[in-house]
C-alpha cells in the first residue's frame, strides 16, 4: 500500500452486517475509514444529497442501494422502495427529483416473472413520484450470489425554492416535527420474513414524501433541517444531527406517533421503536415561531394527517438525544448499536 495514503482510525478487522445498519458501526465506517480515504483530512459533513453547480445551474445528486429481503412485502416491494428511497433523499435535502438511473444486479436463476413484476413496480412508483427513469445498467451474477435481485440508483434533482436545509441552520429553541408514525417499515419487513410469531395488520409506509416537503416550502415556514429516518430510525437521524451541531434534542415520549402493532412487536423483541426504520416519513427541525404553522400545513396535505411536533432543540445536553416522559423522568437514546433488523432496505 502506498505510503501517501491518509491514515485512518478504523480498527474493525472486517466488515460485518452491523456496518450497514445505519447506526454506530455505519458512522464509524464512514468517519474513520471512508471519509479519510476519500477526502483526506478535510472530510465534509455527508448529507443525503450532494449540491453541485453544473454549467451555472444548481443541482442535487444522490445514490442509494436496495437489498431488502423479501423482495415483496405488504405496502411495497424492492422496485417501489428504490424509487421512494431516492426521491426522498433528494426531497429532505431540498430538491425535487427529475431523473433516475437504475442499476440491477440479478442472480442467475431469478424468474423472469419476478423481474418483470419489480420493473413494473419501479416504473409505477416513478410515474407517481414525477421522476423519469433515464438509464441504468444490468449485471448478472452466479446463482447464490445476490439473493435474486439488488437495485442501486442515482438520482438528480433541482432545488425547491424556499428550502435550504442544513445542520448549520439549527438553533436552540427550534421544534422537531415528524410527518407520521415511526417504525412501520422495519417491523413490516420483519413480519414478512416470518421471523416473528406475531400477526399484525401492518404495512410498510414506503412512499414519496415530496408532496409534504413541497407543502412546507410553499408557505415558507422556517425549515432548518430535514432527514428521512430510514436505517437506524429516528434515534440515529437525530443523534447525527446532535453530533453535527453540538446541541441537545429533547423528545416527548407521549407525542411520538406509534402504531400499537409496532409497539407490541418492539416490546416482544426488546427493541426501541426509535431505532426502527421508516421509509415514508421525514423529520424536520422548524424555527419555533413557525412550528404550529408547519404542523397545520402538513396536516392539511394528503398523507400528513398524523404529523406531530415531538420535541425541541436545546443547548444542553450537548450532542445528546433525550426522551422525556409524562412522569418527569427521561432517558438517553443513543444511535443504533448492532444490526437487529438486517436487510430492511
Image: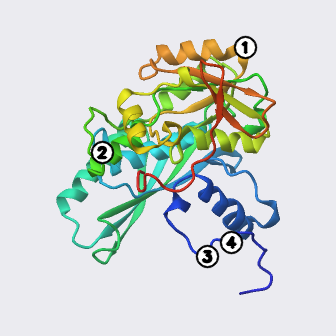
* Residue 123 can be seen in this image: no
Quadrant (top left/top right/bottom left/bottom right) for the N terminus = bottom right
What's the CA distance linking mark 3 and mark 1?
49 Å
Q: Tag on residue 191?
A: 2
Q: Give the mark toward the camera: 2 or 1.
A: 2
Q: Tag on residue 11?
A: 4
Q: Earlier in the sequence, mark 1 or mark 4?
A: 4
Do residues under tags 3 and 4 come within 8 Å of each other at their CB atoms? yes
What's the CA distance linking mark 2 and mark 3?
33 Å
Q: Nearer the viewer, residue 177 or 224?
A: 177
Question: Residue beneath label 1, please?
Answer: 289
In the displayed structure, 288 sits above or below 208; it is above
Question: Residue beneath label 3, please?
Answer: 13
**Secondary element at image label 2:** helix
Crowding around mark 4 (Cα neighbors within 10 Å: few <14, some 14 to 19, many 20+) is few
Q: Nearer the viewer, residue 99 or 246?
A: 246
Amino acid at each position: 500500500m502506498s505510503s501517501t495514503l491518509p491514515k485512518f482510525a478504523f480498527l474493525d478487522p472486517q466488515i460485518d452486517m452491523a456496518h450497514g445498519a445505519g447506526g454506530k458501526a455505519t458512522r464509524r465506517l464512514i468517519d474513520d475509514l471512508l471519509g479519510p480515504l476519500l477526502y483526506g483530512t478535510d472530510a465534509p459533513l455527508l448529507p443525503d444529497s450532494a449540491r453541485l453547480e453544473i454549467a451555472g445551474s444548481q443541482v442535487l445528486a444522490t445514490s442509494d442501494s436496495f437489498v431488502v429481503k423479501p423482495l415483496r412485502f405488504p405496502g411495497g416491494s424492492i422496485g417501489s422502495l428504490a424509487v421512494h428511497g431516492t426521491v426522498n433523499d433528494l426531497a429532505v435535502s431540498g430538491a425535487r427529483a427529475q431523473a433516475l438511473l437504475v442499476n440491477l444486479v440479478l442472480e442467475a436463476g431469478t424468474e423472469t416473472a419476478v423481474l418483470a413484476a419489480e420493473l413494473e413496480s419501479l416504473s409505477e412508483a416513478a410515474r407517481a413520484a414525477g421522476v423519469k427513469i433515464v438509464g441504468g445498467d444490468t449485471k448478472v451474477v452466479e446463482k447464490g450470489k445476490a439473493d435474486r435481485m439488488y437495485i442501486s440508483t442515482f438520482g438528480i434533482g433541482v432545488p425547491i425554492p424556499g428550502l435550504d436545509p442544513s445542520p448549520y441552520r439549527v438553533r436552540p429553541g427550534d421544534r422537531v416535527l415528524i410527518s407520521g408514525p415511526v417504525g412501520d417499515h422495519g417491523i413490516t419487513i420483519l413480519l414478512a420474513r416470518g421471523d416473528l410469531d406475531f400477526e399484525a395488520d401492518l404495512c410498510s409506509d414506503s412512499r414519496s414524501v415530496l408532496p409534504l416537503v413541497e407543502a412546507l416550502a410553499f408557505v415558507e415556514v422556517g425549515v432548518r433541517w430535514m432527514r428521512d429516518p430510514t436505517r437506524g430510525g429516528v434515534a440515529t437521524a437525530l443523534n447525527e444531527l446532535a453530533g453535527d451541531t453540538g446541541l441537545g434534542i429533547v423528545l416527548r415520549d407521549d407525542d411520538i406517533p406509534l402504531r400499537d402493532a409496532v409497539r407490541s412487536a418492539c416490546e416482544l423483541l426488546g427493541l426501541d421503536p426509535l431505532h426502527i426504520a421508516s421509509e415514508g416519513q421525514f423529520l424536520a427541525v422548524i424555527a419555533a415561531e413557525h412550528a404550529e404553522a408547519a404542523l397545520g400545513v402538513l396536516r392539511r396535505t394528503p398523507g400528513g394527517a398524523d404529523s406531530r411536533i415531538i420535541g425541541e432543540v436545546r443547548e444542553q445536553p450537548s450532542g445528546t438525544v433525550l426522551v422525556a416522559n409524562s412522569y418527569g423522568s427521561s432517558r438517553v437514546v443513543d444511535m443504533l448499536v448492532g444490526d437487529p433488523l438486517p436487510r430492511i432496505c
